[in-house]
């Protein structure tokens, strides 16, 4: 199958591009490189442009009249930034996504897969997994823009007789196990990114943001999903949409490991896997943080036949290995 992958020069999109190619599909990447990396599109079918640029979209759909589906990853993803610049997030993640969706439908591409997020949910009850019908409470413009586009998609897919799916990712970790892609931001704010950078520097102090939450050790809980398992969920979703050939529909599905891991447990696992001599301290809560929860992935298991296979330890190990490779690639003359 031939798939248009927006955001295919980014972390998750590029990893899915590799998974698609490994499975014998043909990815066509559309990315503005506003964040994504030119290295990730070398050797790929690549269109450099914005997802809402009519001229670029015209070229993509004219030159690839045989596209079977769109996988839409392109977005702004910084939660904190979205609280400062909500208009940017509604433009990029909602308004532009609608332009892309309608261009795809007008070109006759009737299967559309969208990257949504667990950030749309209200924090769960301790010990209970979040289901797709659990209460929603997006706390940032980022999360709201994702939830709003889910709804736009549901309505427009029905109007056009198309099939849409939104995958709500929990916390992706790791890298392509074949090391073709991985996290690349120089100054990551998320948990594993920060730990990995400290470890690469040979040590330092890591601060746990609060230990007075209602969890088993007081630190927030998250559900970490290996990015390669996440990529496999996209393949399963693609097969499912193709098999539903004549159907109009819209499905929402959680993609997580179904295992709740606290920040403290995560840090301990990281220290074991990396062997890094980090100094771990407890600081204040991060504003806007929640006690968190984990995914109930019954729907993805039953409907897509998808189950995660890779452990958190492997996610951490792959992230560490990727960090080394990525740093070396950024220093082509061997200078460090
Ligand atoms: N990384 C996570 O933790 C996470 C969690 C939940 C959901 N998601 C979702 O997964 C998707 C991919 O995330 P990621 O981590 O790979 O992010 P990323 O920033 O690495 O990749 C996003 C890509 O989209 C491109 N892009 C952004 N705006 C564009 C535009 N207007 N036109 C064309 N290209 C544009 C960027 O250049 C980049 O290559 C996003 O939709 C994100 O909301 C990510
Ligand atoms: O130095 C740090 C960094 C993080 N944390 C804690 O680790 C947990 C996880 O934080 P992340 O920033 O890694 O991830 P979030 O669960 O906050 O989720 C956000 O980042 C995710 C990517 O990791 C997704 O993008 C998601 O949509 C977005 O809400 C939080 O309790 C956070 O406070 C620390 O204790 N210390």
Image (cartoon, rainbow, N blue to C red):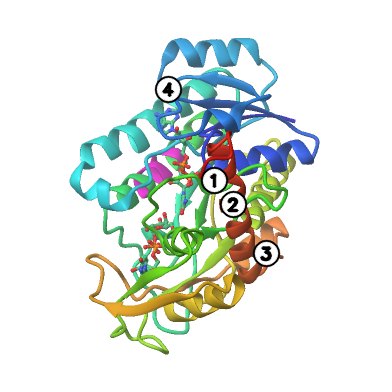
Q: Is residue 38 above or below residue 277?
A: above
Crowd band around label 3 with a 10 angstrom C-alpha radius: few (<14), some (14–19), many (20+): some
Distance in Å between CA atoms under marks 3 and 4:
32 Å
- Res 180 quadrant in image: top right
Q: Name the mark on residue 324.
A: 2
Q: Secondary structure at mark 2?
A: helix
State which tag comes first along the sequence, 1 or 3.
Answer: 3
**Mark 1 and mark 4: span between their CA atoms?**
28 Å
Give whichever of discs 1 and 4 has the lower sequence position: 4
| Region in magenta | 147-153
* Rendering coords of residue 121 (x, y %): 38, 63
Quarter of the rendering containing residue 214: bottom left
Measured in 3D between alpha carbons, the distance from the residue under mark 3 to the one under mark 2, in whole angstroms, is: 25 Å
Q: Secondary structure at mark 4?
A: loop
Q: Which residue is mark 4?
A: 50
Q: Quadrant of residue 16?
A: top right
Give the Cα separation between the discs numbered 4 and 2: 31 Å
Q: CA distance from mark 1 to mark 3?
A: 28 Å
Q: Which mark is residue 75?
A: none
Query: Dots 1 and 2: beta carbons under 8 Å?
Result: yes
Along the line of sight, which residue is nearer the eye, 108 or 76? Answer: 76
């Amino acid at each position: 199958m031939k798939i248009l992958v927006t955001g295919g020069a980014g972390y998750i999109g590029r990893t899915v591009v590799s998974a698609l190619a490994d499975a014998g599909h043909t990815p066509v990447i559309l990315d503005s490189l506003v964040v994504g990396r030119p290295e990730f599109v070398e050797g790929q079918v690549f269109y450099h442009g914005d997802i809402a640029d009519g001229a670029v979209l015209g070229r993509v759909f004219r030159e690839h009249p045989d596209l079977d589906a769109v996988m839409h990853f392109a977005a702004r993803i910084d939660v904190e930034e979205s609280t400062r610049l909500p208009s940017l997030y509604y433009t990029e993640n909602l308004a532009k996504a609608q332009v892309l969706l309608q261009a795809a439908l007008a070109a006759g591409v009737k299967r559309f897969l969208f990257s949504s997020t667990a950030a749309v949910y209200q924090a769960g009850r301790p010990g209970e997994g979040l289901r797709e019908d659990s209460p929603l409470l997006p706390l940032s413009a980022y999360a709201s823009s994702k939830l709003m586009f889910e709804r736009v998609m549901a309505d427009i897919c029905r109007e056009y007789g198309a099939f849409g799916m939104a995958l709500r990712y929990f916390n992706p970790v790791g890298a392509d196990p074949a090391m073709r892609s991985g996290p690349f931001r120089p100054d990551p704010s998320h948990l594993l990114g920060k730990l990995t950078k400290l470890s690469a520097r040979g040590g330092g102090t890591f601060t746990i943001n609060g230990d007075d939450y209602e969890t088993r050790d007081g630190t927030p809980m998250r559900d970490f999903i290996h990015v390669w398992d996440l990529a496999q969920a996209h393949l399963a979703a693609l097969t499912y949409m193709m098999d539903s050939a004549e159907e109009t529909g819209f499905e929402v599905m959680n993609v997580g490991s179904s295992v709740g891991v606290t920040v403290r447990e995560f840090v301990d696992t990281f220290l074991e896997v990396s062997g890094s001599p980090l100094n771990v301290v407890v600081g204040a809560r991060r504003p806007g943080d929640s006690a968190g929860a984990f995914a109930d992935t019954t729907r993805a298991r039953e409907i897509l036949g998808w189950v995660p296979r890779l452990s958190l330890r492997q996610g951490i190990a792959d992230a560490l290995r990727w960090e080394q490779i990525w740093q070396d690639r950024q220093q082509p003359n061997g200078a460090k």
